[in-house]
Amino acid sequence: MRSVGKAQRTVEEHRAAVAALLGQTPVEDRPLAAALGLVLAEDLRATIALPPFDNSAMDGYAVRAHDVADATPERPVQLPVPEDIPAGRTDSPPLLPGTAHRIMTGAPMPPGADAVVQVEHTDGGVHSVRVDRSVAVGTHVRRAGEDTDAGALVLPAGTPLTAPRLGLAAAVGAATVAVRRPPNVLVLSTGSELVSAGQPLRHGQIYESNGVMLAAAVRDAGGHAEQLRFVPDDVPQFLTALTDRITSATAEGNPPDLILTSGGVSAGAYEVVKDALADRGVEFVRVAMQPGGPQGAGRLDGPGGPGVTVVTLPGNPVSSQVSFEVFVRPALRAAMGHPRPTRPLVRAALSETLHSPAGKRQFRRGELDAAAGTVRTVGGPGSHLLSALARANCLIVLDETAEVHAQGTEVDVWVLDS
Ligand code: AMP
Ligand code: MG
């Protein structure tokens, strides 16, 4: 491998630096409805069994199996029906021998009954029923505790809360869950060429796009994003925008966990982020990757010592988004306690021969054909090719140790649309 100069970091080094700056967010109790995608911070135990009581799995008749043992369509058995037990009935009328209670799905089994004849095997009678089939003991009865025992560990700490898991938490009677709160992220774009949607574009200007993209990426990672109004390449305006919002957010009791900037970090003449933050606790480095070489990260000097974590991403839209994928998304997810902070990684064979610069890990936009186990590029390596990024479903990782990656070579692929 080509040796990496002093000013350079490997992808792993910068990744670790960003993750270390962020740390884990505090644990809080949240209503189930506000917990989707968050990660359980404490074990969730069932205080009740599931089902909590023996109940019917069918609409039909609760019987003693013995009473209908001889029933056939030709020689049905007729039983009186003293009680109707809809779901939600809370008393327990016992079943006397030689009778049947009409019962609905989910209703508690009456004491004395040991099976349910489904309504399709009867005449559906209300006061008296004709039963056409025999049933074995236990037929269509859902036993208390069959799904989970009282006291059982139903969801261990570290479990990401999916829809079914929230359903399970609700079923065992939990109103809230202990989760790590989503990180609060402020997103600030820089560039004197940037214009808001709805404004006419003059020659030399472009519509601002990193702000909405990075804020969406934060939300997609599970964080809470607030997009600040972008600022021109002007150090005082940049610092004012930043410090004003940090001050007001802190006063509101909602201090940011992370400030994410884009643009102004490379080697040009008007590098506003670098100029503003280099002496304020943020370290600017070159990472041996493409796109996304120029990076910065650190804790902003505050009145009481090191304060809010800042990660400064390069401005080219593809560089910005790929840097987010490589450094920020895993750190945000780790901060929330996610057991798998990184994207799913698969191996796939290149459909074409690719070239990448020596000593740099290249992240190419790709389209994975999971069934075929192959991957092809979408668009070229240019870090301005946003439409190609928008079409891609994966990132192809080209190792820094080789400059030529022959067709058929197996490479790492990060699956994005999962
Ligand atoms: P910079 O990193 O500031 O030198 O910007 C690199 C390239 O990315 C330039 O072509 C910028 O116009 C473009 N760029 C920077 N910030 C944004 C943004 N927020 N939205 C769209 N393009 C941007
Ligand atoms: Mg710029």
Image (cartoon, grey):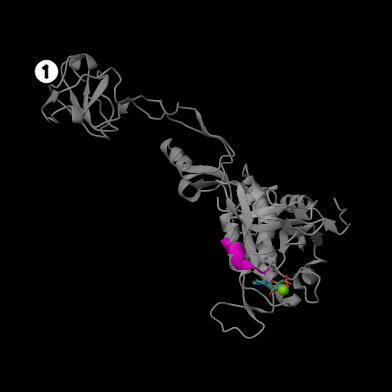
Magenta region: 384-391
Q: Residue at x 61, y 58 (%)?
A: 184
Queried whether the magenta region covers residue 390, the answer comes back as yes
Q: Quadrant of ligand 2?
A: bottom right
Seen from the viewer's position, the closer of residues 214 and 253 is 214
Left or right: 156, with 309 as reference point: left
Q: Respond yes or no on whether mark 1 lies under 8 Å from ligand 1.
A: no
Q: Residue at x 76, y 68 (%)?
A: 265
- Please state the horizontal and vertical placement of residue 391, each as a whole percent of the image: 57, 62
Q: Is 105 left, or right, of 405 in this rendering?
A: left
Residue 209 in the magenta stretch? The answer is no
Q: Position of residue 362 (x, y in %)?
A: 73, 57
Q: Is residue 194 above or below residue 250?
A: below
Residue ID for mark 1: 75
Give the overall secondary structure of the magenta segment. helix
Q: In this rendering, does residue 304 appear at all? A: no
Nearer the observer, 115 or 94: 115
Judged from the image, the secondary structure of the residue bearing numbered disc 1 is: loop
> Residue 213: x, y in percent?
60, 65
Image x and y of residue 128, in percent:
11, 25
Q: Quadrant of residue 248?
A: bottom right
Q: Residue at x 67, y 54 (%)?
A: 396
102, above or below 188, in the image: above
Residue situated in front as seen by the camera: 274 or 403 = 403
Count of picture labels = 1
Specify the amino acid type for callout 1: Arg
Q: Which of the 4 quarters of the picture holds residue 86?
A: top left
Task: Note whether residue 137 is visible.
Answer: yes
Q: Is residue 196 above or below residue 59?
A: below
